[in-house]
Image: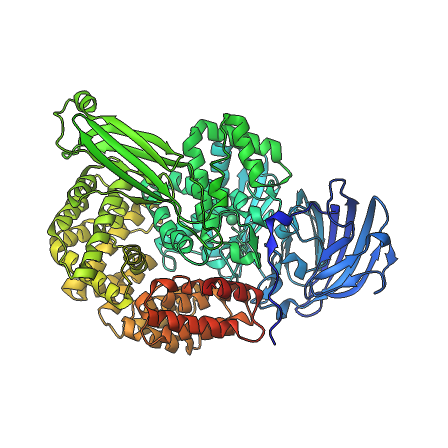
């Protein structure tokens, strides 16, 4: 018999708690097994409380040793203890304020879910967001309960860390105090044999802050870049948002076993080591880029997330969307803004549009959830950031800054909602945002269609929006869609410079005086006008615009908006691929000529040129086919994508060879944007050239590589060329480095021939270094197949689907969060043919029927399967 399905939690059921916390004191007596946690919590009745007046403390998997109220021990008759927590009835509680004390026992060593207190390579660490604190002790584990924490750690380990400032320490103990009231999800503790890479920062008001990155001995030499990124983040937040750091120390700890990227615990950020550790020899340019962005993201949470937090988990986007937007602004300032924007949109389309188009579609602010961990999604994060980007565009940079200043001063120290956030913008800018709010409350990607016609000197344009139905939301209201647009003449003359049009009804009619524009531009009336729509990707929508191939070629050559210039090339490639797929058409030489021009325009950033050269991914093509009413065949998609690459490589061979030689980043590696750009273009050329030239160039690059960016690019090219030696060479060189070996696993699967991909993945799961309990390693192998090799994953026999299901079931028993995340590989299943759908449905049903399935994976599988 299966347990009854866990009940969903609804936003509409939110009630302020009956009790608030004034102060928390915790003592940890650390042991791998049998850690004792003593807590002393001062509660006060909440005058605004709307719950039942009982004291409800969350607690899961903690053994209660003893507890008391105001020093009076409680017996089992005084409270109700369940698998979810402990309740003391109101009648048993003193009026006003009281002190709860408890001693509990937990086993960090047995904790494989990596949530709560656990061990990783002999070090103790915690992960409490979203609901992990309840696995440490009994507490109101909800973000609207904020309190200052004092923590004492007792352990023989040399380094003992918690939130806030260090208070005192001695042989075998240390005490920390965090003066800033915080919810329990921001609690953190670390203990281990660690070494620090240290630095200092002087804040805008002249306070000194000690900065430390704590790592395992031997890794100190891999922290310089993360530290540099941290200092730049701290300065940037002062300069751009006026936000100063607020403690004497800022600690970062790198952990090998971690479910996600990193965590913003107050004053003690904990990171997946892959987003901290880097040397030129072991990390790629992309890794450096991620390190910079994630260090910034977690640091920025100090104000957007920690000082101002979320009232409940439905408001997750309040901190995540905003913090992603902030880290994107930071990265755009540190590197090339157009390149960053294109990369953001690539990510958004690959992950969020995909999510919005399938059974897992949900609002930026969901209405209900079963397991909150399943809602740390591309929609909450990336679409949440896009929504803030639209607000920024609508109110302008000054309005935005004024609103943010008001937000920080009005809500500092509070747990807030999206309503609070929007009210600040309304008050500061005088705008009514009630319709804009639909971006938070309606799921799905809006479709904007543009139609236009010329009559004499006038261009009439209609913009229309439509929001497709999503699970549980059949009908939608129109959103507020900022559409940045310009108009070009066929020779590239800009007739209308960028203008912002706000589409807030289902339809809008626009009129442009082309005659007047031509006159002002000093050109003859053009025979046709080419709209450049949705510049900078001004809204997260799917645009349908009847631009001809000739129009798109003009935009690709001349659009002054770098995003749309790239987008023009992208849409030409997508169309070409679809035509190849559906009627075996040959690619059109005009596209290659336009690319050649762009590639040889030396004033363009090489990173931008590299992006222009990249084809849509196989998953993008599958979605595009599906949108065009064609059932995607993953094998055929893989084939046409390769064919187009080969055709491009043939047509552009001399250009690519010249670029390859011209893009010399110089002898000394630096991860900066300028050098990374050259490497990205050089390696993009290398990959294509390997298709038509044979493997010599890649072989030479591999042999001469002095950095991981080049080594990985050459490795991939050699694998595709059928090299059977390179994997062993790489393995022998890097077998001692966990992070590099993650790449070794991944790349072999991603670059295997699709028919062999499952077999390669299977073989690699038998490798002695395949430690499936390590989330990074698990994702390298399983994700290497599901995301890295879609044609292999969708093997018509169903072997890929079965392989994934087997591993999900195995991992779910140990680490539900990681299993649930990986299950999204199935979310696109409705796109495919009846045979594949049946195979996937079979696996989903097999998982759903499994004994002891977690709430995490159970919810995902049932949502993906649908009704
Ligand atoms: N709040 C974290 C961030 O955005 C992410 C996070 C949520 C997380 N839950 C987690 C990280 C669990 C690790 C494990 O930066
Ligand atoms: Zn975050």
Q: Residue at x 35, y 53 (%)?
A: 285
Horizontal side of 26 relative to 676 (left or right) equals: right
Up the image or down, 523 lies above or below 106; here it is above
Indicate how the structure is coloured in the image. rainbow
Q: Residue 289: give x, y in percent of width and height.
A: 39, 50
Q: Nearer the viewer, residue 447 or 125?
A: 447
Q: Is residue 665 visible?
A: no
Q: How many marks?
A: 0
User: Does residue 657 appear to the left or right of 791 in the view shown?
Assistant: left
Q: Residue 155 sits in which quadrant?
A: bottom right
**Residue 664 x/y as whole percent:** 23, 50
Quarter-wise, where is residue 478 in the image?
Answer: top left
Residue 243 horizontal/vertical position (percent): 54, 35
Give the quadrant of residue 204: top right
Asked if residue 246 lies left or right of residue 600, the reply is right
In the foreground, 763 or 255: 763
| Residue that sits furthest to the front in the current view | 475
Give the percent coordinates (x, y) of residue 671: 36, 49
């Amino acid at each position: 018999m299966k347990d009854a399905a866990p009940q969903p939690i609804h936003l509409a059921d939110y009630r302020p708690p009956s009790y608030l916390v004034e102060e928390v004191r915790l003592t940890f007596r650390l042991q791998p097994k049998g850690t004792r946690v003593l807590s002393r919590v001062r509660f006060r009745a909440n005058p605004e409380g709307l719950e039942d007046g009982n004291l409800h403390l969350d607690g899961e998997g903690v053994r209660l040793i003893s507890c008391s109220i105001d020093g009076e021990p409680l017996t089992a008759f005084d409270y109700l203890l369940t698998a979810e927590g402990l309740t003391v009835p109101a009648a048993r509680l003193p009026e006003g304020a009281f002190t709860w004390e408890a001693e509990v026992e937990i086993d960090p060593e047995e904790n494989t879910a990596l949530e709560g207190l656990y061990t990783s390579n002999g070090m103790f660490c915690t992960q409490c967001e979203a609901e992990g604190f309840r696995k440490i002790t009994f507490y109101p584990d909800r973000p609207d309960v904020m309190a200052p924490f004092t923590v004492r750690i007792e352990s023989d380990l040399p380094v003992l860390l918690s939130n806030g400032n260090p208070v005192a320490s001695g042989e075998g103990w240390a005490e920390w105090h965090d003066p800033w009231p915080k919810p329990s999800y921001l609690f953190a503790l670390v203990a281990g044999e660690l070494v620090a890479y240290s630095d200092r920062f002087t804040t805008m008001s002249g306070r000194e802050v000690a900065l430390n990155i704590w790592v395992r001995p031997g890794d100190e030499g891999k922290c310089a870049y993360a530290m540099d990124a941290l200092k730049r983040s701290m300065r940037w937040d002062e300069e751009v948002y006026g936000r100063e750091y607020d403690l004497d120390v800022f600690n970062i700890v790198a952990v090998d076993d971690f479910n996600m990227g990193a965590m913003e615990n107050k004053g003690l950020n904990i990171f997946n080591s892959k987003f901290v550790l880097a040397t030129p020899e072991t990390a790629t340019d992309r890794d450096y880029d991620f390190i910079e962005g994630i260090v910034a993201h977690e640091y920025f949470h100090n104000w957007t997330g920690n000082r101002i937090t979320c009232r409940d988990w439905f408001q997750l986007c309040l901190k995540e969307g905003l913090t992603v937007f902030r880290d994107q602004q930071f990265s755009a300032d540190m590197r090339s803004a157009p390149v960053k924007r294109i990369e953001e949109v690539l990510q958004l389309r690959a992950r969020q549009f995909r999510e919005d188009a399938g059974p897992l579609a949900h609002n930026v602010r969901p209405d209900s959830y079963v397991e909150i961990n399943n809602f740390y999604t591309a929609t909450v994060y990336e679409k949440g950031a896009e929504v803030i980007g639209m607000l920024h565009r609508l109110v302008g940079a000054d309005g935005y800054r004024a609103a943010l200043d008001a937000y920080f001063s009005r809500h500092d120290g509070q747990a807030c909602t999206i309503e609070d956030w929007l009210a600040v913008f309304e008050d500061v800018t005088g705008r009514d945002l009630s319709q804009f709010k639909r971006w938070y409350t309606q799921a799905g990607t809006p479709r904007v269609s543009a139609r236009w016609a010329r009559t004499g000197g006038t261009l009439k344009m209609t913009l229309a929006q439509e929001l497709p139905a999503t699970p549980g939301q059949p009908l939608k209201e129109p959103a507020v869609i900022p559409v940045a647009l310009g108009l070009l003449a066929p020779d590239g003359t800009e007739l209308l410079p960028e203008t912002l049009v706000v589409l807030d009804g289902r339809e809008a009619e626009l009129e442009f005086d082309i005659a007047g524009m031509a006159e002002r531009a000093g050109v003859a009336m053009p025979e046709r006008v080419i709209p450049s729509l949705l510049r900078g990707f001004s809204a997260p929508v799917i645009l349908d615009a009847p631009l001809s191939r000739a129009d798109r070629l003009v935009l690709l050559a001349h659009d002054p908006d770098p995003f749309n210039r790239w987008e023009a090339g992208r849409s030409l490639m997508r169309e070409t691929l679809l035509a190849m797929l559906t009627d075996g058409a040959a690619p059109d030489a005009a596209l290659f000529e336009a690319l050649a021009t762009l590639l040889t325009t030396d004033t363009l950033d090489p990173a931008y040129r590299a992006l222009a050269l990249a084809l849509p991914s196989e998953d993008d093509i599958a979605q595009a086919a599906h949108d065009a009413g064609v059932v995607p065949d993953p094998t055929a998609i893989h084939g046409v994508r390769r064919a187009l690459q080969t055709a491009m490589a043939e047509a552009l061979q001399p250009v690519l060879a010249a670029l390859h030689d011209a893009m010399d980043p110089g002898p000394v590696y630096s991860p900066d944007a300028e050098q990374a750009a050259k490497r990205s273009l050089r390696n993009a050329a290398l990959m294509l050239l390997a298709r038509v030239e044979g493997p010599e160039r890649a072989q030479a690059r591999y042999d001469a590589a002095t950095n991981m960016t080049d080594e990985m690019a050459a490795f991939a090219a050699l694998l595709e060329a059928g090299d059977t030696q390179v994997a062993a060479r790489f393995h022998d060189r890097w077998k001692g480095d966990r992070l590099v070996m993650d790449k070794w696993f991944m790349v072999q699967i991603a670059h295997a021939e699709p028919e062999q991909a499952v077999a390669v993945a299977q073989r690699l799961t038998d490798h002695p270094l395949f430690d499936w309990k390590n989330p990074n390693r698990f994702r390298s192998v399983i994700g290497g197949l599901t995301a890295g090799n879609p044609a292999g994953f969708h093997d018509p026999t169903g072997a890929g689907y079965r392989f994934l299901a087997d591993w999900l079931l195995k991992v779910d028993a140990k680490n539900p969060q990681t299993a649930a995340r990986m299950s999204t590989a199935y979310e696109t299943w409705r796109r495919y043919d009846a045979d594949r759908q049946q195979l996937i449905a079979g696996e989903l049903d097999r998982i759903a029927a499994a004994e002891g399935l977690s709430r995490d994976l159970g919810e995902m599988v049932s949502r993906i399967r649908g009704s």
